[in-house]
Image: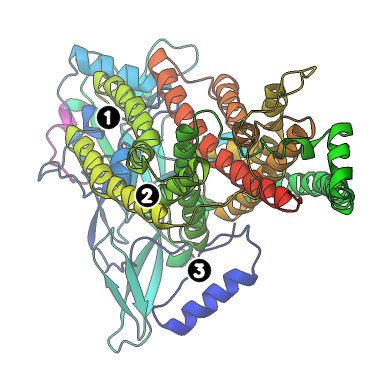
């Protein structure tokens, strides 16, 4: 994984950076830090923030303060959250953990009252469900390291508690040993301009005043469970100094979770000077050393298979089509008529190939929504590859996707109505098609998310969307996406319809019987696009459900290009095969030839649930997983089906425009 690329505000370096991106390997993505560089002075106080508690077992986030932790002296204050953070279930609050820059100290926080039955039960449940505390300092998530099978494994966050093997008791993490990496910065002729800790900022090299101090470049923790004397510690005040302590190994010296037990929370902090510079501080979170080899191997393997198959397909395909066209065009009219009686193949369906398909309105709607989803995906991945959606800006990726989807409604309306006008020959009923296009995919998503949201509401999870956010999403949908889709549809009515190169007969031609169902071939065609996608799909699912950072958008961009090529190839070849057996009903088969990859994506998601998310517990968690997986597979079906259909449509149009018609 490439390190961060720091870009200044002057135009020349920006142009050089874009030029560097153009000539560099596409798999090496860089990022623009999402928060501005903050330099702290000696002993300046800073406070950590806490996000929702998360678990890979339940996939239901909960508020940090739903557990009996120490509260800040000034009360709980929520940080401003963008749309993406709210949809992801993030709830960022302030915390009582105070750090004084470059000052090592051991501090007391508080001692809780005796745990009542509900608190003790809740702590035990969160511990056994492997819930993690997600803490941030200067926008950096806290990291911890564990040893597994001789390897050092890096995690973000730390557990609420732990349940030792062979013990019936659960123990809470009540002492944290923090290590903060700081880079000593001497700012000469540098100015830092920003809008706040979470805001974007620019570094200018033309300032006269300069500044120096310390920059936070790393945040690590070692969680401990330490048995304290609550009577002695309850006499202390928050932030009083205490003696440092090592993490105990014996369970007798650890803090057990039990009813009426009083828990004392303390922490140590150590500041360590580091050579890591601020623009590179996220590299530790984004390293993909072993994973990068897997990505490249997958891509090269897929590329070789695709090129090999494409070479064979196109050689046979081009020779066959060109030979057929040449023979057909060299004959006179009488010979052509005789040839039509004697030969079989795609030439015989010339009068039926552009016959109106079944459910033309639904086809136009799905193609329009597919264009909208595909456009959103392409633009999002390109912007992410350029580094404009850094993980330092939480929720930016999802927010960007929503905004792009809303404004691409104009493209969905235009394509659906242009296709509707081409198929039916008139723009009559375009308003109904436009409305349906604007409501089809979002409506299905809204229904599924509403059901899942009721499940989350019942579990009191922070992942549940508040009513206000529901109305906000509905307002965005009806005030931006729907009007733009109608505008796009209106523009589509003014565009010229695509003229078919051949006339359609009044009486449909009988389709010869086949030895095997044609849909069997359509379902099998989805395996090739899935072959280019499934390795990257594993990393994406791991990022979503296991809380890992996914930031190899360069690889994802390559996979997207390969997927588009394969979908186009598969759909064109299958369409040609159907026409060769005199089956002129190619419209829907062209769509599902590439769109059937969604079936394999959903089945792979179930496989991932069974074999990779074995810790996922309970019907509620499985319902959430399957609901989100269904939405993902459905969106993939619309996008890939649109690629295959549009490619096949223009191929059939080109093929029959070369045939001489009386």
Q: At x 32% / y 72%, what residue is drawn?
A: 213
Q: Circle 2 sits in a helix, a strand or a loop, which is it?
A: helix
Please tell me how crowded label 3 is: few (under 14), some (14-19), or many (20+) other residues with Cα within 10 Å. Answer: some
Closer to the camera in the image, 405 or 158: 405
Q: At x 76% / y 50%, what residue is drawn?
A: 659
Can you identify the residue that label 2 sits on?
489
Closer to the camera in the image, 48 or 369: 369
Q: Is residue 428 visible?
A: yes
Can you identify the residue that label 1 sits on?
464
Q: Is residue 240 magenta?
A: yes
Viewer-nearest of discs 2 and 1 = 2
Can you identify the residue that label 3 sits on?
5
User: Answer yes or no: do the residues labelled 3 and 1 have beta carbons within 8 Å?
Assistant: no
Viewer-nearest of discs 3 and 2 = 2
Q: At x 16% / y 19%, what residue is drawn?
A: 114
Viewer-nearest of discs 3 and 1 = 1
Q: Residue 440 in the image: state x and y as whole percent.
A: 38, 34
Of all residues, the one furthest to the front in this rendering is: 334
Q: Circle 3 sits in a helix, a strand or a loop, which is it?
A: loop
Q: Main secondary structure of the magenta part?
A: loop
């Amino acid at each position: 994984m490439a390190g961060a690329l720091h870009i200044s505000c002057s135009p020349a370096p920006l142009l050089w950076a874009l030029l560097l991106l153009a000539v560099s390997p596409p798999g090496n993505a860089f990022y623009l830090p999402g928060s501005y560089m903050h330099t702290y002075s000696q002993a300046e106080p800073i406070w950590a923030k806490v996000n929702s508690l998360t678990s890979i077992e339940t996939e239901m986030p909960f508020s940090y303060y739903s557990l009996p932790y120490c509260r800040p002296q000034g009360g709980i204050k929520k940080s401003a959250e963008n749309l993406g953070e709210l949809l992801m279930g993030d709830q960022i609050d302030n915390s009582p953990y105070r750090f004084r820059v470059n000052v090592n100290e051991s501090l007391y926080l508080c001692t809780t009252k005796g745990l009542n039955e509900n608190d003790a039960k809740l702590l035990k449940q969160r511990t056994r469900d492997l819930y993690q505390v997600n803490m941030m300092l200067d926008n950096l998530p806290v990291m911890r390291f564990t040893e597994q099978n001789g390897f050092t494994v890096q995690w973000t966050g730390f557990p609420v508690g732990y349940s030792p093997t062979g013990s019936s008791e659960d123990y809470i993490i009540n002492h944290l040993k923090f290590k903060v990496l700081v880079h000593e910065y001497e700012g000469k002729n540098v100015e830092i301009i920003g809008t706040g800790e979470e805001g974007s900022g620019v570094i200018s090299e033309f300032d006269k005043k300069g500044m120096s101090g310390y920059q936070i470049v790393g945040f690590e923790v070692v969680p401990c469970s330490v048995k304290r004397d609550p009577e002695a510690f309850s006499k202390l005040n928050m932030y009083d100094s205490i003696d440092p302590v090592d993490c105990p190994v014996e369970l007798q010296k650890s803090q057990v979770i039990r009813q009426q037990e009083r828990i004392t929370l303390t922490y140590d902090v150590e500041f360590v000077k580091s050579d890591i510079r601020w623009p590179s501080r996220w590299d530790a979170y984004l390293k993909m050393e072993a994973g990068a080899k897997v990505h490249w191997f997958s891509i090269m393997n897929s590329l070789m298979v695709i090129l090999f198959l494409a070479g064979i397909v196109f050689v046979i395909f081009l020779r066959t089509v060109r030979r057929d066209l040449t023979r057909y065009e060299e004959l006179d009219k009488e010979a052509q008529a005789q040839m039509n009686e004697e030969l079989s193949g795609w030439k015989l369906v010339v009068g039926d190939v552009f016959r109106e398909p079944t459910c033309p309105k639904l086809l136009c709607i799905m193609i329009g929504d597919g264009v909208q989803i595909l456009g959103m995906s392409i633009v999002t991945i390109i912007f992410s590859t350029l580094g404009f959606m850094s993980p330092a800006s939480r929720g930016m990726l999802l927010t960007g996707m929503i905004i792009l989807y809303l404004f691409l409604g104009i493209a969905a309306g235009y394509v659906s109505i242009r296709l509707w006008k081409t198929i039916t020959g008139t723009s009559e009923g375009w308003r109904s098609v436009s409305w349906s296009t604007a409501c089809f995919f979002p409506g299905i998503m809204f229904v599924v998310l509403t059901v899942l949201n009721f499940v989350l509401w019942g579990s009191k999870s922070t992942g549940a969307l508040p009513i206000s956010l529901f109305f906000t999403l509905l307002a965005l949908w009806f005030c931006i996406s729907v009007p733009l889709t109608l505008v796009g549809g209106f523009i589509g009515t003014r565009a010229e319809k695509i003229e078919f190169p051949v006339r359609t007969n009044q009486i449909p031609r009988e389709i010869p019987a086949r030895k095997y169902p044609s849909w069997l071939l359509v379902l099998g065609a989805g395996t090739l696009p899935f072959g280019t996608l499934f390795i990257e799909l594993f990393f994406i699912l791991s990022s979503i459900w296991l809380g890992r950072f996914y930031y190899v958008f360069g690889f994802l961009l390559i996979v997207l290009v390969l997927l588009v090529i394969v979908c186009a190839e598969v759909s064109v070849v299958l369409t040609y095969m159907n026409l060769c057996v005199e089956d002129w009903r190619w419209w829907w088969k062209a769509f599902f030839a590439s769109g059937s990859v969604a079936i394999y994506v959903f089945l792979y998601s179930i496989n991932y649930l069974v074999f990779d998310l074995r810790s996922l517990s309970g019907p509620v968690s499985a319902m959430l997983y399957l609901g989100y997986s269904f939405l993902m597979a459905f969106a993939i079906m619309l996008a890939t089906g649109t690629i295959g259909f549009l490619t096949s449509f223009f191929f059939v149009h080109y093929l029959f425009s070369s045939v001489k018609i009386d």
